[in-house]
């Protein structure tokens, strides 16, 4: 089931000439692999977005879904902390208008047929980053570290080759310099390391079963207090291009 979901998404992307996976598609794959994500849905009209946002529960986030927009924020395609149906309807229209203007500025017509992603505006937890890259020689490697300044400035990250065992995942979590933050410092409760380990192992399994993934970022991922789990807030997946069949030499 998990592999079928991923393969179907990849086939759709490649058929459209893209090697990046839209956010709703990435979340469909993660959901299939049991990776915890905020509640989400998609909508193509303002009324539908408001109705689905109410079902998810306010506040929510709206993001444009388009194969022609890779960086949503640059196109004015993200609205956060929307607190009621009226705000959702207004945000939907603003996102659509911004996307059309973005296309005009780029000299192209933006496909907006997929509408928007509606997602629960999750509570902030301890931010970590989980990423995957594929090396031509060694294969896939998974990176883990605390988010924010720890990864951007201090480069406090660790790597393991995929596939990974639970021992590998727990060793990764414990060997970064900032590991004590997850244990709880200065009166802060310990974080849910077991939930974090499960996310790492699920990502490892997903990549092992789908080797066409060349890059993956679960960023940010929030870890909550012990017993309260984890959430992958956003995910970016890149896949390899379709290999062209070479003509036989004459």
Image: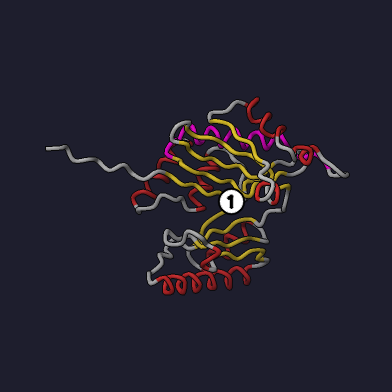
Magenta region, mostly helix, strand or loop?
A: helix
Side of 5 where 183 appears, left or right: right
Q: Considering the numbered disc 1 on the image, is that residue within a helix, a strand or a loop?
A: loop
* Residue lying at the far left of the rendered structure: 250
- Spot the residue most to the front: 154
- Residue 208 in the magenta stretch? The answer is yes
76 in magenta: no
Residue 128: percent from left, percent from top: 67, 45
Q: What residue is at 58 percent from the left and 51 percent from the top?
A: 234
Q: Coloured how?
A: secondary structure
Q: Position of residue 206 (x, y in %)?
A: 51, 36
Left or right of 172? Residue 204 is left
Give me the residue at 38% from left, 69% from top. Answer: 109
User: Left or right of 192: which side holds 212?
Assistant: left
Foreground of the two, 66 or 46: 66
Residue beneath label 1, please? 234
Q: Which residues are magenta?
A: 189-212
């Amino acid at each position: 089931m998990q592999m079928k979901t991923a393969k179907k998404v990849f086939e759709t992307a490649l058929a459209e000439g893209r090697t990046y996976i839209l956010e709703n598609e990435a979340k469909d794959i993660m959901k299939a692999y049991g990776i915890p994500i905020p509640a989400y849905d998609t909508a193509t009209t303002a009324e539908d977005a408001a109705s689905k946002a109410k079902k998810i529960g306010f506040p929510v986030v709206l993001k444009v879904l388009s194969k022609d927009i890779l960086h949503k924020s640059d196109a004015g395609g993200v609205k956060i902390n929307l607190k009621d149906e009226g705000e959702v309807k207004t945000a939907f229209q603003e996102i659509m208008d911004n996307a059309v203007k973005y296309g005009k500025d780029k000299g192209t017509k933006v496909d907006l047929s997929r509408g928007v992603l509606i997602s629960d505006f999750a509570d902030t937890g301890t931010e970590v980053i989980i990423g995957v890259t594929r090396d031509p020689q060694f294969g896939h490697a998974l990176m883990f570290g605390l988010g924010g300044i720890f990864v951007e400035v201090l480069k406090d990250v660790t790597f393991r080759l995929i596939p990974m065992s639970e021992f590998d995942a727990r060793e990764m979590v414990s060997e970064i310099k900032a590991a004590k933050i997850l244990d709880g410092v200065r009166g802060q409760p310990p974080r849910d390391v077991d939930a974090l380990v499960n996310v790492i192992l699920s990502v490892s399994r997903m990549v092992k079963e789908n080797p066409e993934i060349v890059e993956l970022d679960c960023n940010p991922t929030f870890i909550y207090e012990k017993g309260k789990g984890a959430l992958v807030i956003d995910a970016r997946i890149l896949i390899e291009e379709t290999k062209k069949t070479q003509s036989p030499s004459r």
